[in-house]
Structures are given as C-alpha cells and as structure tokens.
Image (spheres, rainbow, N blue to C red):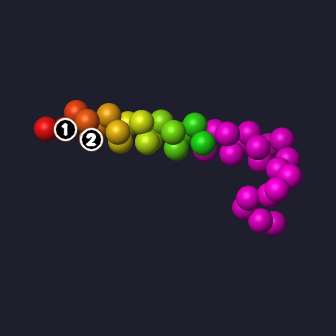
Amino acid sequence: MPVLDPNPQHGQKKMLIVFGVFLAIFVIIGVIATIASP
C-alpha cells in the first residue's frame, strides 16, 4: 500500500490534511523565528 494514494480513503485524506496543517504551522513558526532573530 503506497504512502501517497492517488485515491485516498476518508481516513487517509483526513490524516493527510492534519499533517499538512501541522507542516504549515511548523513552517510559519520557523519563518517567524527567523524574522524575530537578531
């Protein structure tokens, strides 16, 4: 079973969305930390 399925099931799609949100938050925190650092 591939990790990225072209036709993901409901649970897999929900997990992918949660992972995407977590990744976006991580990137935003990284950008803010980079800007705030002297």
Q: Residue at x 73, y 58 (%)?
A: 4
Quadrant position of the N terminus in the picture: bottom right
Left or right of 16 on screen, residue 37: left
| Boundaries of the magenta span | 1-19
Disc ID at residue 37? 1
Task: Using the numbered discs, state the Cα–Cα distance from disc 2 to disc 1 in whole angstroms.
Answer: 5 Å
Q: Residue at 19% of width from left, 38% of height from top?
A: 37
- Percent position of residue 5, x then y: 80, 58
**Residue linked to disc 2:** 34
Residue depicted at x 61% and y 44%: 19
The extreme front residue here reads 35
Question: Where in the figure is residue 6, as x and y percent of width and height?
Answer: 82, 56
On the rendered image, what quadrant is the C terminus found in?
top left
Q: Nearer the viewer, residue 10 or 33?
A: 33
- Does residue 38 belong to the magenta stretch? no
Task: Decide if residue 11 is on the left or right side of residue 21.
Answer: right
| Residue 29 - label | none
| Relative to 37, residue 8 above or below | below
Q: Position of residue 14 (x, y in %)?
A: 74, 39
Residue at x 60%, y 42% (from the top left corner)? 20
Q: Residues within 10 Å of mark 1 (few under 14, many from 20)?
A: few
At mark 2, the secondary structure is: helix
Give the farthest residue toward the left.
38
Instruction: Give the number of callouts.
Output: 2
Q: Are marks 2 and 1 in contact (CB under 8 Å)?
A: yes
Looking at the rendered structure, the kind of residue marked 2 is Thr
Residue 14 is inside the magenta segment: yes
Residue 35 in percent (x, y) is at 25, 36
Quarter holding residue 10: top right
Mark 1 falls on what kind of element? Answer: loop
Q: Tell me the kind of residue under disc 1.
A: Ser
Residue at the far bottom in the pictured view: 1
